[in-house]
Image: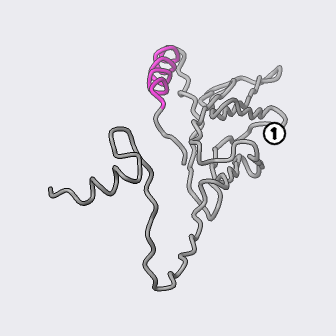
Amino acid sequence: MLMRFDPFREIDRVSQMLSQQGSGRVSSSMPMDAYREGDSFVVRFDLPGVDPASIDLTVEKNVLTVRAERSWEPSEGQDVVIAERPQGTFTRQIFLGESLDAENVSASYDHGVLTLMIPVAEQAKPRKVEVQAGDGHDRAIPATATAGSATSEEERQEHATQPA
């Protein structure tokens, strides 16, 4: 399963807002959706206007990091009136639970949306356990001696015949 909690994300968001407050720029973000579909988790990131060659995905331990860059510089003769579209490097980390197969992540980028497919690990997939039918005969289960219990056959018989 994906883990949602990132204690530093809110701090980063507030810090970005405060640093961009005087510049008139809108805070940059990388919104995402995540859901399970069959034996995979699908994660989609909105990255409009990003060059696919600038997208960098890394998995280290159970942390998947997405980095992408979008830049635009006005050409000579262009007089910018409004520049609200966020520019620069965008980064987002996802903490992957141990039930996901971090070694087999696949990614595609289409129409400004980065889609990751993260398979569920084999050991985390539900499996059917077959129940064996008994033959109807009761069987004795041999017991072994434990510390403080009778150890010789004579002691066991003596212990069994004593009234409680």
- Residue 89, placed above or below residue 122: above
Image spot of residue 126 (x, y percent)? 57, 63
Answer whether residue 141 is magenta in the image: no
- Is residue 1 found left or right of 83 in the rendered image? left
**What segment is highlighted magenta in the picture?**
6-21
Residue at the front extreme of this rendering: 154
Answer whether residue 16 is magenta in the image: yes
Image spot of residue 64 (x, y percent)? 66, 35
Q: Residue at x 64, y 44 (%)?
A: 45
Badge 1: residue crowd in 10 Å (few <14, some 14–19, many ≥20): some
Q: Nearer the viewer, residue 35 or 113?
A: 35
Amino acid identity at mark 1:
Pro
- Dividing the picture into quadrants, the one containing residue 98 is top right
- Is residue 147 found left or right of 99 in the rendered image? left
Image spot of residue 65 (x, y percent)? 67, 32
Q: Nearer the viewer, residue 140 or 122?
A: 140
* Secondary structure type for disc 1: helix
The residue carrying mark 1 is 52
- Residue 16, placed above or below residue 146: above
* Magenta region, main secondary structure: helix
